Image: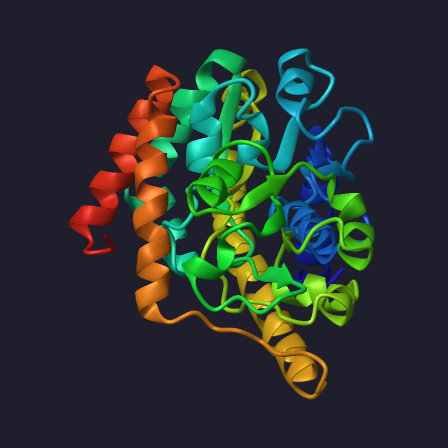
């Protein structure tokens, strides 16, 4: 037997010896057909490869075991091992999750949010917020600054007055209401129908490319892009008890892999957005509206007042407010 063959066999034996030492069940907050979910599946495969097969993650789409707002409970009960989710979905448990999960109007691009999470205190704060639920925050990601879908031209804060806009409950609705709009509660599954029937004039939905693919821009022909309002925190987290039992090398692999996942998903969605914008620009029926720096600043000023009001809802929300505003001020982002 050659030395090369011996080494190769040793490698196979080594990998098989550790195969599937750690099997985890994670649930995503995205549906299986969504691009976000497909990129999350790629992350799962990379973790298995990076760990030499020692870690296997069974990733389930939204609603497979628990509602998207209840995966924290699923982890606490030991039915789920982890989640890839939008943190703001847990604002019903603590307003702090709503404030850190989507600080409306705070971030102008994905790097600003990721820098806060990785180097500005967000990582430590998330682990503090998750501690009572027995959950370990592995790392944060995001999608992209979300576009706004609209049936009517929107070029300024003044244009929001009286606008029937679909917006998620919590801080997003609060900010749009303060700006003069009339927020409407509507599930994401009903946004297309609501726009087509005129039940709503506009919608805070998701990134431009997903809107374009879903045909939103064909019925709401005045999208606002780049977005000025929403940049959600997407977090990858798992059972703290199971995390603590992992060896240091596996913990490091998971931590580094989530940083890579954040770069991967934000880059892929940005590329998809650029292609979708070109497609929309080629359609004479669609007019893309890009808000001026002055109008973005006006919206930010309105949002800042609402951050402060929202922070009063819980001690943890106040901690989030203090942390984020301190970071924004120190980095000249206010």
Residue lying farthest to the front in this orientation = 162
Which residue is found at the position 61% from the left and 68% from the top? 223
Which quadrant is the N terminus positioned in? bottom right
Q: Is residue 117 among the parts visible in the rendering?
A: yes
Q: How is the image coloured?
A: rainbow
Relative to 111, is 73 above or below?
Answer: above
* 64 to 222, vertically: above or below: above
In the image: residue 197, left or right of residue 142: right
Q: Nearer the viewer, residue 42 or 191?
A: 191
Q: Is residue 155 above or below residue 166?
A: below
Residue 322 relative to residue 303: left or right: left
How many badges with numbers are in the image? 0
| Residue 121 visible to an observer of this rendering | no
Q: Residue 303: horizontal and vertical position, in percent?
A: 37, 44
Q: Identify the residue at image location x=50%, y=51%.
A: 230
> What is the x, y in percent for residue 323?
27, 34
Q: Position of residue 320 (x, y in %)?
A: 33, 30
Quarter holding residue 322 = top left
Above/below status of 190 relative to 158: above
- Which residue does the image show at 33% across and 69% down from the upper left? 293
Q: Looking at the picture, tell me which residue is in the foreground, 188 or 330.
A: 188
Residue 302 in the image, given as x and y percentages of width and height: 34, 46
């Amino acid at each position: 037997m050659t030395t090369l063959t011996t080494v190769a066999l040793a490698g196979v034996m080594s990998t098989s010896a550790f195969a599937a030492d750690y099997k985890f069940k994670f649930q995503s907050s995205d549906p299986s057909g969504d691009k976000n979910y497909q990129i999350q599946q790629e992350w799962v495969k990379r973790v298995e490869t990076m760990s030499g097969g020692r870690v296997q993650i069974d990733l389930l789409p939204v609603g497979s075991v628990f509602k998207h707002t209840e995966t924290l409970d699923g982890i606490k009960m030991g039915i789920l091992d982890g989640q890839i989710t939008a943190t703001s979905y847990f604002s019903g448990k603590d307003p702090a999750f709503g404030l850190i999960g989507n600080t409306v109007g705070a971030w102008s691009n994905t790097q600003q949010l990721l820098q806060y999470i990785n180097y500005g205190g967000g990582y430590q704060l998330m682990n503090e917020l998750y501690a009572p639920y027995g959950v370990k925050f592995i790392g944060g990601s995001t999608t992209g600054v979300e576009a706004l879908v609209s049936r009517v031209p929107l070029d300024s804060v003044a244009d929001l007055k009286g606008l029937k806009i679909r917006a998620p409950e919590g801080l997003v609705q609060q900010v749009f209401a303060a700006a003069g709009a009339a927020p409407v509660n509507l599930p994401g599954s009903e946004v297309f129908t609501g726009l087509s029937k005129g039940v709503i004039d506009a919608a805070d939905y998701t990134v431009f490319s997903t809107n374009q693919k879903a045909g939103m821009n064909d019925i709401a022909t005045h999208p606002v892009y780049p977005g000025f309002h929403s940049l959600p925190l997407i977090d990858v987290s798992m059972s703290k008890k199971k995390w603590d039992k992992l060896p240091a090398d596996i913990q490091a692999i998971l931590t580094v892999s989530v940083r890579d996942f954040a770069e991967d998903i934000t880059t892929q969605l940005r590329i998809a957005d650029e292609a979708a914008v070109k497609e929309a620009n080629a359609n004479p029926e669609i007019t893309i509206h890009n808000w001026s720096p002055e109008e973005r600043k006006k919206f930010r000023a309105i949002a800042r007042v609402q951050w402060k009001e929202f922070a009063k809802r819980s001690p943890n929300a106040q901690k989030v407010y203090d942390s984020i505003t301190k970071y924004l001020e120190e980095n000249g982002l206010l």
